[in-house]
Image: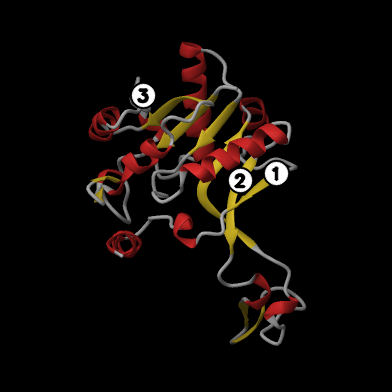
Amino acid sequence: MRILALITARGGSKRLPGKNIRILGGKPLIAWSIDVAKDIPEICDILVSTDNSEIATISIDAGAYVPWLRPAELALDTTTSVDVAIHAMDEYEAERGKVDGLLLLQPTSPFRTKGTILKGIDLFKKNGQLPILGVSPTHVHPMWTMKMEGNHIIPFIKGGGLNIRSQDLLPAYVVNGGFYLISPDELRKNHSFIGKTTIPLIVEYQVESLDIDTDIDFKFAEFILSN
């Protein structure tokens, strides 16, 4: 099986400028995702799609494959990860042949482990190459969430409310952003990383689910490493 690991890293982050190459634990943030994908037999290449030459250079030094810079029209605030992934996949397959799966590893999830990646790939193999999506237990159950109605609040979900005991709630999960694995045909057909039938890769370890998007997130990541 040939799986292409894709790391998307746009240069123009607004909430945390330069986050993809900001130093975390002695190495650029993007290098964490590059390093964890190395030495996995099914991964044929670790491709970085970026519009930024500095990110490209740092990624190459870390061991990634960066054959081109992403076109400007695919580096806008409105550009979706699906558009970027399909472009990268098209370019890669034209150069290096077909792949069986595309593994999206967002560089903002530095603490995902090799064991989690291997588990996700194993699920992909065992489930007929159905899409695999990384999820984690939610910290706030949706049945306990609220919404505004006029000037007061009511349960967001009908039948919900704080009177429901935690032991009476079904498990609920959120997408953690750390793992997306899908076949090229399904991604191109549905233009989504989530299919009609999607297999969850459940990540229980809270640290792995950290998604760095703000300065506070980054400081929390530094705190985790220091402890």
Asked whether 115 or 183 is in front, the reply is: 115
Q: Residue at x 49, y 26 (%)?
A: 87
Q: Amino acid at mark 1?
A: Thr
- Give the alpha-carbon distance from disc 3 to disc 1, as whole Å: 29 Å
Q: 2 left or right of 65?
A: right
Of callouts 3 and 1, which one flags the residue occurring earlier in the amino acid sequence?
3
Colour mode? Answer: secondary structure
Question: Disc 2, disc 1: CB below 8 Å?
Answer: yes
User: On screen, 175 above or below 185?
Assistant: below
Could you tell whether 44 is left or right of 174 in the image? left
What label sits on residue 133 in the rendered view? 2
Disc 2 element: strand
Counting labels gives 3
Give the residue at the far right of this rendering.
Answer: 159
Q: Measured from the top left, where is residue 161 in percent x and y?
A: 69, 82
The residue identified by callout 1 is 198
In the rendered image of this protein, does residue 28 appear above or below residue 219? Answer: above
Amino acid under disc 2: Leu
**SS category of the residue bearing label 3:** loop
Q: Which residue is mark 3?
A: 65
Q: Position of residue 141 (x, y in %)?
A: 63, 72
The correct choice, above or below, for 48 with respect to 30 in the image is above
Separation of residues labelled 3 and 2 (CA atoms): 24 Å
Disc 2 from disc 1: Cα separation: 7 Å
Q: Residues within 10 Å of mark 2 (few under 14, many from 20)?
A: many
**Amino acid type shown at disc 3:** Tyr
For the C terminus, the image quarter is bottom left
